């Protein structure tokens, strides 16, 4: 497999994305979470993992390539919405995980015409002090000299279960070794963009069907964040018992729940 990485170009920015599934099918947009490197580097693995959705016309958007020094969640949502405009995507089923879920929530509030259904994985409506402390520590690690090892270690311990880290130890170690200074600088800007995020006053504007998926042992957002978000939205939800933040990568039935929700 050799997934084609394409670029959306607007007068303001460029954004990488890739596309798979059925050309002409209903549009699905995947918005990934905060990552140490570009998610497009894992395009082949993502396409393979998401074959359950191959009947749809699936787009996965990275963040913009030329990230400004200050880049908030709302800024990310505006740019993603503009990228969807350029590609002619309307009424999409959007899957947002972690930071991507925050972006998806902002799009649903401010660009409701872009969203048909919304899946929010390990997402939150705001950042509490515990979350802020963890993210601030990641920023500190990334800003240290030769900070890749410390950042990748802390990041992976927070988002993955012990069993997953053991199974993919070599890949995690390779990520630390291959993380460049520009990757760390990019991570810092994207992570800082989360710190003042609070969409609670605007959640009532979301009218589309929503599914919230989370984990009770989420070490990033806290075990109650997904349930609180579902309660605030009055929507369908499922909270896993045996996973951490990256339940979207680990739970074998995760995409089954997404697919069933799309078919309702």
Image (cartoon, helix red, strand yellow):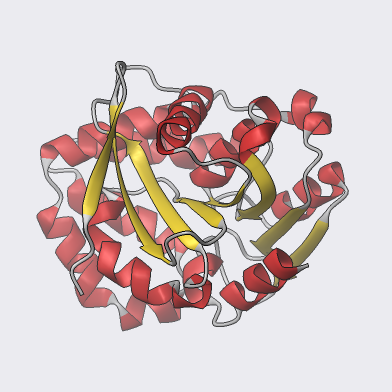
Q: Quadrant of the N terminus?
A: bottom left
Q: Describe residue 2's horizontal placement relative to residue 199 as left or right.
A: left
Q: Position of residue 33 (x, y in %)?
A: 45, 49
Picture quadrant where residue 198 is located: top right
Q: Describe residue 204's horizontal placement relative to residue 62 as left or right.
A: right
Residue displayed at 41% across by 38% down: 87
Q: Quadrant of the C terminus?
A: bottom right
Picture quadrant where residue 82 is located: top left
Q: Position of residue 18 (x, y in %)?
A: 31, 53
Q: Between residue 1 and residue 146, name the one nearer to us.
A: 1
Q: Describe residue 243's horizontal placement relative to residue 71 as left or right.
A: right
Work out whether 54 lies above or below 38. below
Work out whether 115 lies above or below 210. above
Would you say residue 105 is visible in this rendering? yes
Residue displayed at 37% across by 17% down: 70
Residue displayed at 26% across by 53% down: 40
Q: Describe residue 220's horizontal placement relative to residue 14 as left or right.
A: right
Q: Position of residue 91 (x, y in %)?
A: 63, 44
Residue displayed at 42% across by 53% down: 59
Q: Between residue 139 and residue 211, name the one nearer to us.
A: 211
Would you say residue 127 is visible in this rendering? no
Q: Position of residue 205 (x, y in %)?
A: 80, 29
Q: Between residue 139 and residue 29, name the one nearer to us.
A: 29
């Amino acid at each position: 497999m050799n997934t084609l990485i394409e670029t959306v170009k607007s007068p303001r920015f460029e954004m990488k994305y890739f596309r798979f599934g059925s050309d002409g099918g209903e549009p699905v947009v995947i918005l990934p979470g905060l990552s140490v490197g570009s998610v497009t580097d894992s395009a082949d693995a993502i396409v393979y993992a998401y074959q359950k959705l191959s009947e749809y016309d699936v787009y996965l958007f990275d963040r913009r390539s030329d990230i400004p020094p200050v880049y908030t969640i709302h800024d990310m949502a505006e740019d993603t919405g503009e990228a969807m405009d350029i590609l002619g995507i309307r009424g999409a089923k959007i899957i947002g995980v972690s930071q991507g879920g925050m972006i998806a929530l902002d799009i649903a509030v401010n660009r409701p015409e872009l969203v048909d259904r919304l899946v929010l994985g390990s997402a939150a409506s705001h950042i509490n002090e515990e979350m802020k402390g963890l993210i601030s520590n990641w920023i500190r690690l990334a800003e240290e000299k030769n900070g890749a090892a410390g950042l990748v270690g802390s990041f992976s311990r927070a988002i993955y279960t012990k069993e997953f880290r053991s199974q993919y130890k070599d890949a995690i170690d390779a990520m630390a070794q291959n993380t460049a200074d520009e990757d760390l600088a990019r991570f810092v800007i994207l992570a800082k963009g989360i710190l003042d995020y609070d969409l609670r006053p605007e959640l009532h504007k979301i009218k589309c069907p929503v599914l919230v998926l989370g984990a009770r042992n989420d070490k990033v957002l806290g075990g109650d964040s997904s349930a609180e978000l579902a309660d605030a939205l009055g929507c369908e939800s499922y909270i896993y018992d045996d996973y951490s933040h990256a339940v979207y990568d680990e739970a074998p039935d995760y995409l089954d729940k997404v697919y069933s929700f799309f078919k309702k």
